[in-house]
Amino acid sequence: MMKRLMLAVGLVLLLVAGAASASVIGVDLSLVPPSDQANRLELTLTASALFITRHDTDYANLAGNVLASLSVNFDPTPLDAEVIGLEFTGGGITLSDLSFTLDYGFLGTLQANGTGIGGTLDTPTPPGVVTGGAFAGSDHVVILNQGTIVSGGTGIIGGMADSLAVDLGTGPIIATTNQWGSLVVSAPTPVGGQAICGVTLSMPLQYDEEIYNQEGVVVSATLSGMIEAHGQFSVSTMPGDADIDGDVDLDDFVLLKQSFGTMDGATWQMGDFTGEGAVDLDDFVLLKQNFGAAAIPEPTTVCLLALGGLAALPRRHWQLRGTDTSGDTC
């Protein structure tokens, strides 16, 4: 008994309280089919020549995907996922071809065509904050850095615009908005040792800038619309998997160790696998039972001693919320 007590006391001395951070999860979001409400941009081309201004409007359908990293607070007990951060990391979007005709009467016409236009989304200062499913659109940008806008035309105006060519590879259009976007995460669906969450991204776009100014011709572009994309991510709900990366290893041990002794407000990422708001020996027993569920590096001597000490202690009764009799954990 004394030996067991000494091992338990030694373990507690090794465990110091600490804070846990949100899990960062990558997600691939596919743009939904274009409609009047989403993924159809309205673009207006305005040109001034010989002190006369004309404009024309066309519409471009969007297709492709968006890659993002989500900072997620995940609590398997009860089953819940909250996104608190958003960073766009890549992917590719394309626009259908555009055609504009600007009529200057007896002075001729200006015709411009946009072809091969595409780009990606980016977060200049990551991560953008998400609060209650809403995020500031100004934290993110759409960069159209592929394709060209070239001109032709008739009459005097057409002759002036022969040199009009905008290469988005060297002069990209960078669009953002002061409006709010939304990131809706569905209630997690437990499947075995995983929880699957659906994601819907909606991000408004605005752009109104000069894109060409040479030889007496000034051209500006205006665009507006809404990007909408859907996807999903899954996270591990295995008791002991504190960092939610699909296995139980030394990283999880460290997270529990840092928070051991927390008696109120503890989360899954801190090592509260029983859902009681505390990190104690019950949680450590769960971690020990699943330790090594995936390939792991060899534990250190201290970790082995700590786990061995727990094995020698009498087990307390515990109940894991969200676990059914089949062993699938919610």
Image (cartoon, rainbow, N blue to C red):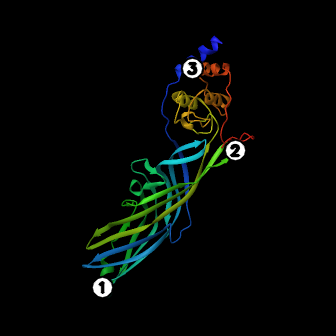
Q: Can the viewer see residue 286 in this picture? A: yes
- Helix or strand or loop: what does disc 2 sit on? loop
* 321 vs 295, nearest the viewer: 321
Disc number lying in front (2 or 1): 2
Residue placed under numbered mark 2 in the picture: 192
Answer with left or right where residue 3 lies relative to residue 176.
Answer: right
Mark 1, Cα crowd under 10 Å, few <14 / some 14-19 / many 20+, is: some
Residue 14 spot, x, y in % from top left: 53, 21
Q: Residue at x 46, y 73 (%)?
A: 59
Q: Position of residue 120 (x, y in %)?
A: 46, 57
Residue at figure coordinates x 24%, y 79% from the top left: 51
Q: Residue 113 vs residue 213: left or right?
A: right
Towards the viewer: 161 or 300: 300
Look at mark 1 in the image and give the residue it sits on.
107
Query: Tags 3 and 2 in contact by the CB under 8 Å rule?
Result: no
Specify which label sits upstream in the sequence, 3 or 1: 3
Q: Residues within 10 Å of mark 2 (few under 14, many from 20)?
A: some
The CA distance from mark 2 to mark 1 is 71 Å
At label 3, which amino acid type do we have? Leu
Q: For the residue marked with disc 2, what is the amino acid?
A: Gly
Residue annotated with mark 3: 11
Q: Is residue 125 above or below residue 62?
A: above
Q: Residue furthest right?
A: 326
Mark 3 and mark 2 lie on one chain; the one further toward the N terminus is 3
Where does residue 152 sit, x and y in percent of width and height?
A: 38, 77
Judge by depth and name the residue closer to the eye, 29 or 84. 84
3D distance between C-alphas at marks 3 and 2: 32 Å
Q: Residues within 10 Å of mark 3 (few under 14, many from 20)?
A: some
Which three-letter amino acid code belongs to the residue tagged 1?
A: Leu
